[in-house]
Image (tube, helix red, strand yellow):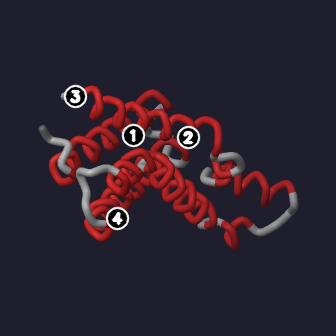
Amino acid sequence: MTSYKIAIILLTLLMHFIYDFHIQGILAEMKQKSWWSNECNKYHAPFFKYRNDYKIALIVHSVECALFTMLPLIVDMLISEHTGHLQDAWILFLPCVLLLTVSHYLIDDKKANELKINLVQDQLYHITFILIICLGSFPVIGLWW
């Protein structure tokens, strides 16, 4: 593996960590069903009315994190000589973002709401998916040499 590919992978992982640990803000709380329950109790609001709102926050968090995480890969696809057409980059980018969004949603739901995994497992699963996406996209964008 060339140093260029390693740099893309490291930048992608760095973007994930920056978003997941520093940028997500209030979404870190809003993606938890327990936060909505506590807020409803605090303001004497009926929880049944807001019982699924955490899912929207979790979707927004997952989409944002996926887009932010994949920035190094899409920038490379768009400006490097390895990809000649913007259309080709989007054809690859959209499935990557979709896969990362769905995996992020499922993993974070297991951690934040089902309490079935801990933070270490959460991050290992995210890293695994990011590596799969990066390594899987390299042959398509001409980085598999």
Name which residue lies at 64% across and 43% down.
23
Which-is-in-front pick, marks 4 and 1? 4
Instruction: State the image coordinates of residue 17 (x, y, percent, origin top left).
Output: 52, 35
Distance from label 4 to label 3 (Cα)? 25 Å
Q: Secondary structure at mark 3?
A: loop
Q: Secondary structure at mark 4?
A: helix
Name which residue lies at 81% across and 67% down.
45
| Amino acid type shown at disc 1 | His
Distance from label 2 to label 4 (Cα)? 21 Å
Which circle marks residue 139 in the picture?
none
Does label 4 or label 3 sit earlier along the sequence? 3
Residue picked out by circle 3: 2
Q: Residues within 10 Å of mark 3 (few under 14, many from 20)?
A: few
Between residues 52 and 80, which one lies in front from this camera angle? 80
Q: Residues within 10 Å of mark 1 (few under 14, many from 20)?
A: many
Q: Are marks 2 and 4 in contact (CB under 8 Å)?
A: no
| Image quarter in which the C terminus is found | top left
Q: Secondary structure at mark 2?
A: helix
Distance from label 3 to label 1 (Cα)? 23 Å
Which-is-in-front pick, marks 2 and 4? 4
